[in-house]
Amino acid sequence: MESMMDQTVGHESKVENTQPVTFQTPVKPITAETWPVEDVMALFDLPFNDLLFKAQVLHRENFPNGDVELATLLSIKTGGCEEDCGYCPQAARYDTGVEAKKMMDVREVLNAAKAARESGATRFCMGAAWRSPKDRDMEKVETMVREVKAMGLETCATLGMLKEEQAQRLKDAGLDYYNHNLDTAPEFYNNVISTRDYQDRLDTLGHVRTAGLKVCCGGIVGMGETRRQRAGLIAQLANLNPYPESVPVNHLVQVEGTPLHGLDPLDPLEFVRTIAVARITMPKARVRLSAGRRQMGEAVQAMCFLAGANSIFYGDKLLTTDNPEAEDDRVLLEKLGLKTRGVVEKKAGSCS
Ligand code: SAM
Ligand code: DTB
Ligand code: SF4
């Protein structure tokens, strides 16, 4: 199979890896520090225990409560996406078995949010397989946001690229966070996606900040990138000014039919290192151990929590692929003695 590594798609990225990107923002900056890629690389190159120790010390200083956030995802519009993201099972052009569906009804979304809240989630993230939302979709999404917020959940949405006025409408509806990932380092980006560029993503993040929304922005590792490119992704995120409040670190979930299926998997210890480096460079962010947990096993996840991860996607499904069963997560968190932000309902027969 031809891997994405062998292909050159798209155009040259104009985004320089070391440039801090400052947004005009009403939100108080949470950092003024900039991270040259070399310095991030030096963290990656530390002996494993030194890196984890450093990350854990910073983690305790910044999160003395030590809790783990539970965020539940729901795909409110699945499949049929026009983009060509090489990792994504929802791109219409790849034959992955994901069926294109129309947007969910508000009622169904609210039922899912209620179930998420009852099982202990504090954040509800609504995802849509769109390049960007059409203006005709906005009203329905705004209703979803307004009503999920009214249930007492933190709200997050990931709908693709936004115009400034769309970000403002979401803010007005009560959206807390907007998730839009940089995905990878600028110099690797064109190996993975050709239908929109890095600068488009930075522009959307700028609109999200201008609207006063909190930013959830991270990426994916295990796509065939080098360690230096992983450092490049983290440097980009850490140099956003301010850096994101939430940083999802996804491990590529390889889905048959996508161009990235069949790559050699990333060494799990390298994934743990990535979490630790995110924690050190963005000490106050919620670092989310995101996609790929099902393939990781308990020991690797435990190391990720030690490295500073303090948020997970919680619920049996991510968007289209499987996440660990919620019950297995409750057992794991209890085994590790990790508290959660919400009240997690305990089922009979779980870990004693
Ligand atoms: N369509 C919107 C967009 O691309 O911005 C929102 C949904 S999209 C599925 C959200 C994010 O999910 C992507 O940016 C990517 O980081 C992550 N993602 C998608 N497929 C993935 C996979 N197979 N493994 C890991 N992460 C994945
Ligand atoms: C993020 O960074 N990861 C989530 C969420 N934001 C939207 C999505 C992961 C998707 C994994 C593949 C799937 O289930 O379709
Ligand atoms: Fe579409 Fe988002 Fe998937 Fe890219 S990641 S193909 S934009 S759903």
Image (cartoon, rainbow, N blue to C red):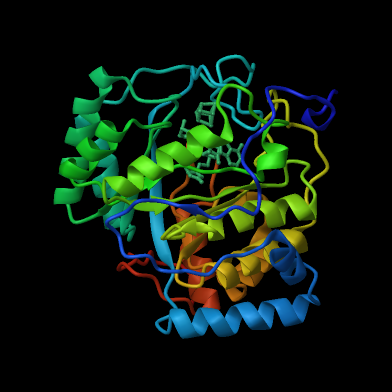
Q: Is residue 271 above or below residue 48?
A: above
Left or right: 231 as drawn, with respect to 247: right
Q: Is residue 33 above or below residue 80?
A: below
Q: Quadrant of residue 94?
A: top right
The image shows residue 42 at horizontal and vertical percentages of 76, 70
Residue 186 on image: x %, y %:
66, 41
**Foreground of the two, 160 or 288:** 160
Q: Which of the 4 image quarters holds residue 104?
A: top left
Q: Along the line of sight, which residue is nearer the eye, 264 or 216?
A: 216
Q: Is residue 264 visible?
A: yes
Residue at figure coordinates x 44%, y 57% from the top left: 244
Q: Position of residue 125 (x, y in %)?
A: 36, 45
For residue 321, side relative to residue 6 (left or right): left
Give the camera-side residue of 260 and 104: 260
Query: Can the viewer see residue 351 in this picture?
Result: no
Q: Residue at x 45, y 58 (%)?
A: 241
Q: Position of residue 347 (x, y in %)?
A: 38, 64
Instruction: Tell me the residue at 76%/64% (across/down).
Output: 269
Residue 171 placement: quadrant: top left
Please determine whether, in this image, residue 87 is positioned above or below residue 99: below
Left or right of 217? Residue 189 is right
